[in-house]
Amino acid sequence: MYLSRLTLSHFRSHLHAEVDVDARPVAIYGPNGAGKTNLIEAVSLFSPGRGLRRASAQEMARRPESLGWKITGVLHGGGQPHEIAFTSEQGAARQVQIDGKNASQVALGRLARAVWLVPSMDRLWIEGAEGRRRFLDRVTLSFYPEHAQAALDYEKAMRERNRLLKEQIRDAHWYKALELQMARSGAELDANRRAALSRLTEAQAGAETAFPIAELEMVQSEGSMPDGEADLLSALEESRFRDIAAGRTLVGPHRTDLYGVFKAKGVPASECSTGEQKALLISLILANARALAGDIGAVPILLLDEVAAHLDAGRRAALYDEICALGAQAWMTGTGPELFAELGSRAQGVEVSEAGELRRV
């Protein structure tokens, strides 16, 4: 799975940018602020979801014009190439077209998948639980595109329930339909997440890699996650008066956290060194890609922003070897070509100037 052409118009810092590449890894380098991350953010939209920055369509528009933006690309993998386009007019929600026809995120997910690692994820093991949930849901979404709809349904119902809780509404009839929706979609969220973790565990255990294995476990901030739709519905009903006192819902998959351990050392990921935490993350991203390749018959596109940070030369070379062994088109960013020297002719370079101009190297 790879992109052979990427064209941007009025997207982020790029007034117009176009690059033609082949299936090899793509090393993007240039000064800070040149728009390197904006390029891989554009590529991330070719996978279902909100992209690597979780930005709104309006936030992606070039400033100060804010005239709307367009991204097009030619995607290869699983048969004939497809031209995919994303457009947003003056802040409107982005629209997807596949081969000139309007399409849904689910249809996009049948053709394209991407997994990524960005610098903000380096704090995954030491930040709050919300960041780990987002990471877990991104991995889960890569395996199960329908996970996004379950999350939307759950969040919508929970917002309405929380509004009732804050207003101190005690009549059970106001809650029944909302709690039924939360139980149904919440149980699906939980089941999808557990299945995704199982896939990651299998992919890590079955691979020879230079990167450490992370043992992962889903935990709740308090108590335990009810098992299945019926138990979650009962828990929501039983927790109602406690939730009214708190003004928010205290039970459900939105309270899930991800706990990781450096397996070889038996040390919690949160207590590992910065380099070890980065290596554990890379291990998970590679495992995600390997597992997805088994599902869809093609290695997903990898997006690795500033991936060389916190990696010594030996581990950096090991990462590049694994990417090439996977056969993945990895879009990687860095400040200079020396960060990708170990790739040699196995990769292609794209230099981004301070003005945002692209040049194949």
Image (cartoon, grey):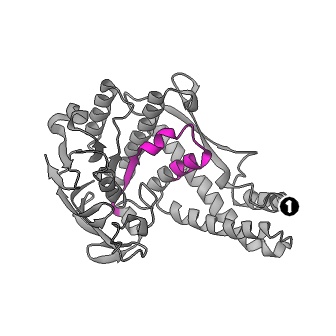
Please tell me how many numbered marks the rendered image carries.
Answer: 1
Q: Residue at x 34, y 61 (%)?
A: 46
75 sits to left or right of 285: left
Q: Position of residue 324 (x, y in %)?
A: 25, 38
Which residues, given as a range, are shown in magenta?
111-137
345 sits to left or right of 242: left
Q: Which quadrant of the view contains residue 233?
A: bottom right
110 sits to left or right of 176: left
**Most extreme residue toward the front, as rendered?**
64
Q: Position of residue 47 (x, y in %)?
A: 38, 59
Magenta stretch: includes residue 292: no
Amino acid identity at mark 1: Phe
Q: Nearer the viewer, residue 142 or 269?
A: 269
Q: Nearer the viewer, residue 350 or 48?
A: 350
Q: Residue at x 73, y 65 (%)?
A: 162
Q: Dot 1 surroundings within 10 Å: few (below 14), some, or many (20 or more)?
A: some
Residue 229 appears in the picture as rendered: yes
**Most extreme residue toward the top, as rendered?**
265
Q: Nearer the viewer, residue 216 or 11?
A: 11
Residue 21 appears in the picture as rendered: no
Q: Position of residue 284 (x, y in %)?
A: 45, 39
Q: Which residue is mark 1?
A: 241
For label 1, the SS is helix
Q: Quadrant of the C terminus?
A: top left
Q: Residue at x 42, y 61 (%)?
A: 48
Q: Residue at x 35, y 48 (%)?
A: 293
